[in-house]
Every structure is written in C-alpha cells, then in structure tokens.
Image (cartoon, coloured by chain):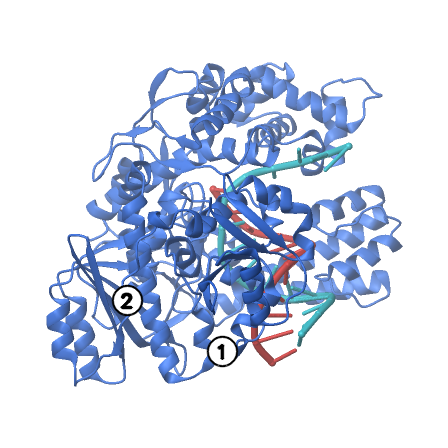
Chain colours: A blue, B red, C cyan
Amino acid sequence: MKKLLLIHTFQDKPYLPRFKECLGATACLLFGETISSRTEIIRLAERAQTPQILCSSPAVLQLLLNSDGIKRPSLDNYAGSLFTLHSDKLGLIEIVFINPLDQLVSVSYGKFILRRYMSKFISPENWLVAPEFIWEECDETNFQRILSSYSSASLIALDIETGKEPQIHITEVGYTAVWISGDSIKTHSCVIQLDSLAKLAMIRQLNLLPAAKVMQNGKYDLSYLSRYNAVPYNYLWDTATLMHCWYSELPKDLGFLGAFFSRNAMYWKDLSKSGNRRDQLLYNCKDTYTTAIAFLQMLAEIPSYAKNNYLLEFPLLFPCHMAEMTGIARDMDELSISYAEQKQIIASEQEKLERMIASPINVSSPVQVKKLLVILGCKDIDSSNEKDLLKAAYRHPINARIITCLLNIRKARKLVSTYLTPGKEFTRHGKQRILYSLNPHGTDTGRLASKEHHFWCGLQVQNIPRGSAVKRTLIADSGFRIAECDLEQAESRDTANVAGDSALIDAVSGERDFHSVNASAFFGVPYEAIYANGKTIDKPLRDLAKKVNHGANYLMGAGVLIDTMGLEKVFEAKSLLKLPRLWLPKQVAEYLLAQFHKTYPSLSKVFYPGVTSEVIKTRLLQSTAVHNSKYQATTKGWARYCFGHPDKNKRDLNGYVAHVPQNLNAMTLNKAFMQVFYDLAFKPEFKLLCQIHDSILFQFKEGHEYLMQEVKDRMEIPVTITGYDGKTRTFTVPAAVKAGKDRHGAHRWSETE
DNA sequence: TGGCTCTGCGCC
DNA sequence: AAAGGGCGCAGAGCCA
C-alpha cells in the first residue's frame, strides 16, 4: 500500500478530515510541528518510512529555497512544485507542495487540485515522463544548426519577453522544439536575445518554420510580433485557451499549468527577479519548455467536450487580434474639455461638501465616509458604497444633500481617474488611439473579457460609461462613421427559450413592450394603462417590473431587491399595488419576486432544478444550441465543467443558472463576430472595433451605409435549442444598428447611443 | 517603496 | 443568517 507523509501547519488542523477524504486507499502520516532544517525533513521521512512527502508549510518551502536567495516565496506559486532531497536510507526523497488546506473548503475546486497533486505520488504512471530540459542561447554561431534541426520538429512552443523602456519592445524570443516519434519525445530549447537586425532575421525564420506553433496566451505575443513583421506561421495551439476550454473555472496562468500538467514541475518565475542576464534567458526558455510540456500532457488527457470547445473558441483569437490592433481614435481636444469639466465638478462639489460638513474629507476613503455616516446618525450602516449611502440619504433631507454631493464627486472622480486621464493613448504618427484587449479565455461563461492593451496602454473597452463624457472623446477615423449593432433583449430571450417557459417566450418575443407586459402580468394592471401607441404611460410601474425582472433573473433574494430598488421605491410599490399597509419592506419584496415566478413558473419549477441536476449528474453544463451560421468548425454547443455544488450552495446555483443564458448569448455573438470578421472586416471600407457582450462596434466608410445592414444580417443568427423542458425550438434574437452622424455631424461613439 | 488585499464602481 | 450573474481598474490602507 502506498504511504505518504503530510507536513502541514497549525492552521491546517481543522481541515485534516477533509484532507483524508482525498486520500482514498493511500495511507498518510501527519506532521504538524515546526521544522527548522532540511536534515529534519529527511529524518522525518526516514522515520515515516516513505520517500514521498506532501507539504503545505510555507516555512518548509522557505527552507528548501533559501539557498537560491528567494525571499518570501508564496506557497500559492509553489503549490504543485516537486522538490527533491537525498536520504542515505531512502534514496531520493520527493516533496510536493500543496495549497493551504483551508482551500479544501473555501475553493470549489480545492479537493480536485489536491487529488491532482497527490496523484504525482499515487499514480505516477499517468504522468508523461518529461523529456530532458536542454537549452542554449541562439546567435550567429549556432543559428544554422538550430534552424535546420527545428525544421523537422513536430511542434514548436514560443514565447516573447518584452521591455517597456524607452519604448515597448521585444527583449527575447524563446523556443522549445518538440520531436515526437513513436513513444519517444525529445525537446530542445533556445532563446534569441533581440539586440540586432540579424537576430530579428533569425526570429523571422524560426517563426516561419512549418511546425505547428503553441503559445500561452499567444495573442500577447502576436501583438508584438506583428509590429516586427515576424508573425509565427501555423499557430494552432494555445495552452491558456485549451485550459479554458477544459476547466474554465480553474486558473490558466503558465505557473499553474506547469504545476498541473508536469509531474516534476518546479515554479521558475522567481528566477526573473534576479536581474542576472543568464537567468533571464533561462527563464524565457523555461516558459516555452513548460508551455510545450503542458501542451503534450493536455493532448494525452483532454476529453472530447474540451476539444469541441476549442473548435468554438480558438478561431476567435483572430478577430480579437485584429480588433485589438485597430483601436479607436481619440479626440485629444475633446478629451481636455471633458477632463476639465469633470475636474470642475469635483472642485465645486468638494467645496460645497466641505462647507456643509465643516471638515475636509476624502470621499474615496471608506474609513472617512463611514465616520461621516456616524455623524449623520447612521452608525448602523457599515458600508460606504452608493447603495448604502442612499439608505442614509433617505433618512433625512440634510443627509440627502450631503450624500448627493459626495456621490457627485465620486462619479466625477471615477470618470477622471479611469477614463479621462490623458496618457492612456497609443501614439503613432502624431495620432492618438485607445487600444484594448479582448480575451476569449477571460470568463467562465464564454463571454469575451476586456483589459487594457498588451502595449501597456489603453482601456478596458467593455465598461466605458454610457453618458457622453467619455464616449464623445472616442471618434471615427477620418472619412468613417462609427456604428454599434446590438442584440435586443438577448439574455431575456435566451432565458425564455433555454428554460422553455412559454409565457416568457411570448412576453419577450411578442410585438408588445416586454417590461410593460411584465408590469401588467406582475401587478394585474391592464397593458394599455402602462404602454400604448409606442409610448410608456405608467413609467413607475414599468420601471418596477424591469427591476423585478432583472433581480429575479439572477435569483436575487428579497433583501437584495430592497437594496437595489431603494426603500423609497419599495414603499411606492406597496401603495401602488395597494398591499397591506402594515407589510414590511421585506414582505413587499417577497411579494414582487413571487409575482415574477407565478407569471413565469417554468423558471423555478423546470429550469433551476434542471440546471442543478445536470451539474450534479454530469458535472457539465452542455449547451444544446445549434446555430445556423457560417465558418463553424463544430456545430456542437459549449460545455462548462462545474466544480461547484448548486444543490448545497446558493452562490454556485446562482452562477450556474446565470451561465446558461449568458453562455448562449455569448456563443451567438461570437459566431456573429466570426461572420463579420470573415465577410466584412477585410474590406478597406470597414473596421472591426470590438464586441461588448451583446453588441459589435465597428466603423464604415461614408457612402457605405449598406454595411450597417450587412452587420445586422450577420448578427441575426437562428438558434435551435432543446430547452430544459425537453422541447426543441428555433428562435432568432433581432439586432438593431445605430450609426454616428454623417459628415455634417460629429463622428463620435457617443452618437451611437 | 513595492506588493498585496479590500472597497467601490464602470459596463452588459 | 443570508446569500444578484459575468468582468477589470483605481484608490485606500496595510505590511514588510
């Protein structure tokens, strides 16, 4: 029988029973005392009569690393790393680090990761024997040899390192070539320090080799290599994308992939901190070696659902790359105007506020704002976010004056600091552009995520404020018009069809205004009294229905609904609906939510239980959607592996229930994005800018207005889906397109709203 | 000073 | 006891 030794910390003690659940038939001795030397570790192993040690102690990690001069190593980074020691009695001792044991409870995938790391000891036969790591620097003296040997490689992993000063540039490019023949796998790694045009020529030649390329988050590398005219040929594999397709809920960084996929992993990223040139080159090589090893292990294990996901996701990297490299022009004059306006608001409101409270205050400091709340007689409110401040405002007119002022400052500050501070622009030929990145592996649901650009500038493009303060500084290129096409009520339509709730399907796809239909159904008021002749008549009731719909969709509880609506609205709803005068806000909120579920009963009766049982039985949420669109490598839907327990944990349930329509919408938009990319984005009169969850932003040349319709046509994709009620339906989410003004007006993003 | 976590808030 | 989904960025505050 296998025997292990666990060295744990005092804090781990409460979780030891959980730990034992993961052991299966393996015996394990536990040790939770202080250890102060390597010899002590060896003696401990000898006494336990096992050369295999699991360890969650940061102190032991420090012991094993201190000869390398690494200060304060993080256990998180080294979890999964394998260290070795030598014992005269036992021979080779292996130590695998694991995460602190509280993660067995606090993280949904805690047990899964622990079992994975344990299997390095328990089932070593499941792990590829890593080929030897051989590396050298590549320069004029050995380039021809390396080029000719790499030309027969089966696979080449590559990775760039970049520097920021004096301007962004590539410092090195690393490669690991892999030769596979039969059961034997050989690798060789090299790194080119990019310090001359001759070296660039070498990089170009290596990148053009026929072998399939594998990168980790390769879009980053592509963005730089594009500028050096050194784009790699045959980029087919991406380890971050693969990981996302397989286990979207797990980390995807290279350090984690190394620990997860390589038995002998040793976290290497602390190397780069040494400042030593050779370490830097070695570091770069290790990145590519780890990418290659992780990829090979993935090939050996990856299940079919993840392969199918990969066919859905990998192609997106190319339109995303194009959009990232396009960006949106910024009107710098308009920026300074808008910046000054917001600064002015901050100054005047700040003065007003400080006059009222007769004291200086930093409104961005939760500590100071909470003190203010105490002074305003609201010491029960222990948070200083907008929602809670509004509670305080509702209590007294003086509070309201002060808090309104405070919130105005916060709003303006947010605009200035996040969106309007100059310097985020990418400047070329004297023109400024806002760049951004779009990451297909960024979310658990299949939506794209956005961040600032790889070039250390730009903005997250998916959370630009809706008003004109920021969007008016983002403009079409000369001779172009900016336009946005969005899918209307996409998530509500998707929810309705996925759940198979016929009432919701009718409400959302009928001719009538959705929120007014809801208001009528929830509150028993005739539709015509809320909405008639294309106009809202009873706005308060319609808004109420909108909030209830939104809240119920995300399985909101009554308490949170009160907070989002605000007490005032809750009381308003009570009198509007003639509910008993003595009802507490909570009862009112519960009533509102109940009305929703009474109107659309399949959601709670069929959809939520369906999601729960699917997750429990299969651990997967498998989409049944089939899209009628072009350029698909697969017609099978996305599958998400689920570590959570929707039957035991409401947060998990909420997340999985929200996943289903969010994922369906994302898949539809992503397919639309592909169609727009292939059919339109290469035309000179068209520029693909980005997608924002239910819309695509683009530009077209003046005089080519028909392109708006072309985009719209490509977004309206018929979807056939089998709902949780077992019935199959086909539906199409309609799209609406809006363009900025033509040559006589401004060509600003703000015009498309 | 740099690095980390927490809080708050922008979007869909 | 109560629990709104999915993201990323800036500032505050704390620690070494």
Left or right: A33, with A451 as reference point: right
Q: Quick check: marks 2 and 1 in contact, CB under 8 Å? A: no
- Going from N to C along the chain, the mark reached first, 2 or 1, is 1
Mark 1 belongs to chain: A
Q: Position of residue A113 (x, y in %)?
A: 48, 48
Q: Is residue A192 above or below residue A131?
A: below
Q: Secondary structure at mark 2?
A: loop
Residue A339 is at least partly visible in this image: no
Q: Which residue position is annotated with label 2?
A: A132
Name the residue at the front extreme. A89
Occupied quadrant, residue A306: top left
Residue at 34% from the left image edge and 51% from the top image edge: A127
Q: CA distance from mark 2 to mark 1?
A: 22 Å
Left or right: A730, with A520 as reference point: left
Report the front residue among A461 and A3. Answer: A3
Left or right: A478, with A403 as reference point: left
Report the front residue among A93 and A707. Answer: A93
Q: Is residue A137 above or below residue A338?
A: below
Q: Which residue position is annotated with label 1?
A: A68
Residue at 55% from the left image edge and 29% from the top image edge: A553
Q: Position of residue A524 (x, y in %)?
A: 63, 14
Mark 2 belongs to chain: A
- For the residue marked with disc 1, what is the amino acid? Asp
Q: Quadrant of the C terminus of chain A?
A: top left
Q: Secondary structure at mark 1?
A: helix
Q: Position of residue A288 (x, y in %)?
A: 31, 66
Q: Is residue A585 above or below residue A711?
A: above
Residue A354 is at least partly visible in this image: yes
Residue at 48% from the left image edge and 45% from the top image edge: A115
- For the residue marked with disc 2, what is the amino acid? Glu
